[in-house]
C-alpha cells in the first residue's frame, strides 16, 4: 500500500502531500522529522483511513478508520507519572496528550509501518477510543 504524508504544523514543508511507497522511505522520513519541536503529522492511506502521529522524543498515534468515525489512541505499556503530559504542535497550537498516550519513538515507527502495510491500527498495541 501507499500513504500520503501531511505535516499538521508546517504548511510549507516540502514533504506535504508526498506519496510514500515503502516502509523504508516512511522510516527515513519519520526519523528525519525528530529534529524539530514535537509536532503532529498525518498519514492517509488509499482508503481514507488516517493515522495522526505525534513526532518528538516520544510520540503518539491516533487512528481513525473513516472521517467522522471514532478515534483511537495507542496506549503505552511503560510506567508513567500521574497527571503528566506532552504537547505536540498542530496548526501553531500546542496539543496536550496524557503521558499514557506517549510511546517510545521506535513504537511509533512500528505503528506507522503496520498502518502503511495494512491500513489498520497495529494489534500489537492497546488502543483506547476517545
Image (cartoon, rainbow, N blue to C red):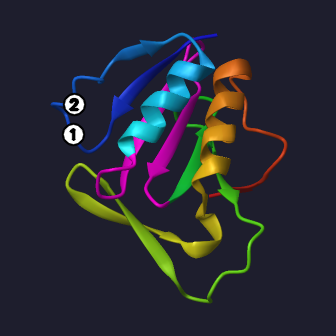
Q: Nearer the viewer, residue 108 or 72?
A: 108
In the picture shown, does residue 105 fall above or below 18?
Answer: below
Q: Residue at position x 61%, y 35% from top? A: 112
Q: Mark 2 and mark 1: span between their CA atoms?
A: 5 Å
Circle 1 SS class: loop
Residue corresponding to mark 2: 13
Circle 2 SS class: loop
Q: Residue at position x 57%, y 53% from top? A: 105
The spot of residue 120 in percent (x, y) is 72, 29
Q: Which residues are magenta?
A: 34-57
The spot of residue 34 in percent (x, y) is 39, 49
Q: Residue most toward the right?
A: 123
In the picture shown, does residue 11 fall above or below 55?
Answer: above
Q: Are marks 2 and 1 in contact (CB under 8 Å)?
A: yes
Residue corresponding to mark 1: 10
**Left or right placement of residue 86 versus residue 119 in this view:** left
Amino acid at each position: 500500500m501507499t500513504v500520503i504524508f501531511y505535516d499538521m504544523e508546517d504548511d510549507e514543508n516540502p514533504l506535504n502531500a508526498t506519496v510514500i511507497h515503502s516502509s523504508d522511505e516512511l522510516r527515513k522520513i519519520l526519523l528525519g522529522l525528530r529534529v524539530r519541536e514535537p509536532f503532529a503529522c498525518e498519514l492517509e492511506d488509499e482508503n481514507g483511513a488516517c493515522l495522526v502521529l505525534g513526532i518528538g522524543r516520544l510520540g503518539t498515534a491516533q487512528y481513525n478508520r473513516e472521517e467522522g468515525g471514532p478515534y483511537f489512541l495507542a496506549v503505552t505499556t511503560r510506567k508513567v507519572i500521574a497527571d503528566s503530559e506532552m504537547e505536540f504542535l498542530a496548526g501553531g497550537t500546542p496539543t496536550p496528550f496524557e503521558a499514557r498516550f506517549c510511546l517510545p519513538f521506535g513504537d511509533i515507527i512500528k505503528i506507522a509501518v503496520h498502518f502503511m502495510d495494512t491500513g489498520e491500527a497495529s494489534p500489537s498495541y492497546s488502543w483506547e477510543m476517545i
